Amino acid sequence: MMSNLDSQEVVSKEIADLHAGAEGETQPRLDFAPYRSSLLRHPTKDLRHADPEGAELVAPVFGHSDIDPVEADLTIQAGGEPIGERIVVRGRVLDGDGRPVRGQLVEIWQANAAGRYIHKGDQHPAPIDRHFTGVGRCLTGDDGSYAFTTIKPGPYPWRNHHNAWRPAHIHFSLFGTEFTQRMITQMYFPGDPLFALDPIYQAITDQKARDRLVATYDHDLSEHEWLLGYRWDIVLTGTHGTWMEADDA
């Protein structure tokens, strides 16, 4: 099966060719050819309008109780501690004018330190950490702040092309006042050598827009002999907005 997949060289050339003719595009194309499955999944017909109230009747419910502060610490697990590099990710959720977004439900999910998810669809030969579920949630504070203590995720292979690897990342989901008001994005780590090779990251052709998906190492957030700190703000709208995955992608 692997012989039928294009090489990284072929995919990287496609990325470079598309970037050359796409200056100033801060949002990814829904049919970005180097990201192979996007050609099959992007919409080809007009979207159908749905009644928001009807959608909420069948929407998922994430948790059966109020949010507990302990849910923001993914390293607290029954039976033992997870394996890997302990980190804290802290930031603020802001609107396009720089005002804090209070009481926002923020959820994250991620692979473990070996680059594997707790999901039946992830079967690549990396170990499962039985002390790490990879999911957490919290509410933003009055100043729009959030914080998660977790394990730095590892990169993992995916079947877009031969020897394809995703850079280490954490998925973020933000809810508004309804389940229909949901935005999803990804946070990356600085200096990752896989950035230039990843069609999903490179689907955003504007370099400054891509940079806004990368967290900043913050030594003041790091804790002595305990964890490393990263800071990442999320801007929901405006010219400096954080890229969000399209609902119709």
Image (spheres, rainbow, N blue to C red):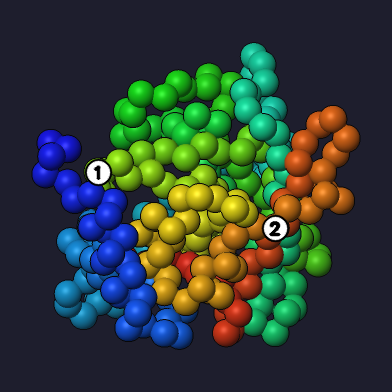
Q: Secondary structure at mark 2?
A: strand
Q: Which residue bears the numbered disc 2?
A: 216
Q: Which residue bears the numbered disc 1?
A: 162
Please indicate whether residue 76 sits to the left or right of residue 51 in the image.
Answer: right
Visible in this render: residue 64? no
Q: Is the C terminus in the top left, top right, bottom left or bottom right quadrant?
A: bottom left
Mark 2 crowd level (few <14, some 14–19, many ≥20, 10 Å Cα): some
Q: CA distance from mark 1 to mark 2?
A: 30 Å
Visible in this render: residue 206? yes
Residues marked 1 and 2 touching at CB (< 8 Å)? no
Seen in the picture, residue 151 relative to 41 is either above or below; the reply is above
The residue positioned 23% from the left and 58% from the top of the image is 10
Please indicate whether residue 230 sits to the left or right of residue 163 in the image.
Answer: right
The residue positioned 23% from the left and 49% from the top of the image is 7
Q: Nearer the viewer, residue 11 or 154?
A: 11
Residue 107 in percent (x, y) is at 58, 50
Q: Nearer the viewer, residue 56 or 127?
A: 127
Seen in the picture, residue 103 relative to 169 is either above or below; the reply is below
Q: Secondary structure at mark 1?
A: loop
Q: Amino acid at mark 2?
A: Thr
Residue 177 in percent (x, y) is at 58, 67
The residue positioned 64% from the left and 14% from the top of the image is 79
Q: Is the N terminus in the top left, top right, bottom left or bottom right quadrant?
A: top left
Please indicate whether residue 121 sits to the left or right of residue 103 in the image.
Answer: left
